[in-house]
């Protein structure tokens, strides 16, 4: 009788500990921070190491946006002025889909998030964090990004 009682207590302790661990992991998975530890609404900036020419400046007229690649990064570029260009990752901060350039916004086709072309801030949809910013410049007739 005593062995049955002790075995039952051990089983209950183990089951309770396991349930608490699963609950803790579930809550951690639901956390809302970016891979860089930024809180919701905080802008993340890619820490690049070298400048890479992405395209000729004439291929990105003022007021337009394009998708481009720089090294292993898929980017969204928007030219705001003659000497001003914005660059962001094309990875949606909601669930990692590929964001695409549209007329005056960046849009995620998966769940409808929309981002501002000048700040990468979400303007609608489920995403609540901005796209990761890349430093960009126009130099010697080229759009260059720090990757």
Image: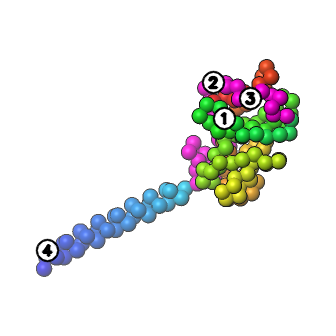
| Image spot of residue 77 (x, y percent) | 75, 38
Looking at the rendering, which quadrant does residue 74 occupy?
A: top right
Query: Mark 4–mark 1 contact, CB under 8 Å?
Result: no
Q: Which residue is mark 3?
A: 55
Is residue 116 something one can see in this rendering?
Answer: no
Residue 122 percent coordinates (x, y): 73, 52
Q: First in sequence, mark 4 or 1: give its number.
A: 4
Disc 3: CA contacts within 10 A as few (<14), some (14-19) or many (>=20): some
The residue under label 2 is 50
The Cα atoms of the two marked residues, 1 and 3, are separated by 9 Å
In terms of depth relative to the viewer, which is nearer, 107 or 123?
A: 107
Q: Are marks 2 and 1 in contact (CB under 8 Å)?
A: no
Q: Distance of mark 4 from mark 1, alpha carbons?
A: 66 Å
Task: Judge whether 117 appears above or below 32 on screen.
Answer: above
Q: Hey, which quadrant is residue 69 in on the image?
A: top right
Relative to 110, is 15 on the left or the right?
A: left
Residue 21 within the segment the image draws in magenta? no
Q: Which mark is residue 69?
A: 1
Magenta region, mostly helix, strand or loop?
loop
Q: Nearer the viewer, mark 4 or mark 1?
A: 1
User: What residue span does the magenta drawing correspond to?
Assistant: 32-61
User: Tag 3's secondary structure?
Assistant: strand
Q: Which residue lies at the image location 76% right of the left edge and 39% below the top edge?
A: 66
Q: CA distance from mark 2 to mark 3?
A: 16 Å
Residue at horizontal 34 percent and vertical 68 percent from the top = 16
Q: Foreground mark, 4 or 2? A: 2
- Above or below, 103 against 137 in this view is below
Work out whether mark 2 precedes mark 3 in sequence or the reverse, and give the earlier one: 2
**Which residue is labeled 4 in the image?**
3
């Amino acid at each position: 009788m005593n062995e049955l009682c002790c075995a039952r207590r051990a089983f209950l302790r183990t089951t309770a500990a396991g349930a608490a661990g699963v609950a803790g992991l579930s809550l951690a998975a639901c956390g809302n921070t970016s891979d860089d530890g930024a809180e919701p609404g905080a802008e993340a900036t890619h820490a690049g190491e070298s400048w890479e020419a992405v395209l000729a400046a004439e291929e990105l007229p003022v007021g337009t946006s394009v998708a481009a690649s720089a090294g292993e990064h898929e980017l969204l570029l928007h030219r705001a002025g003659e000497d001003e260009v914005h660059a962001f990752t094309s990875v949606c901060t909601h669930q990692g889909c590929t964001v695409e350039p549209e007329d005056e916004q960046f849009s995620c086709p998966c769940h409808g998030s929309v981002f501002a072309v000048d700040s990468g801030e979400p303007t609608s949809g489920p995403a609540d964090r901005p796209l990761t910013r890349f430093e960009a410049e126009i130099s010697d007739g080229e759009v260059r990004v720090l990757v």
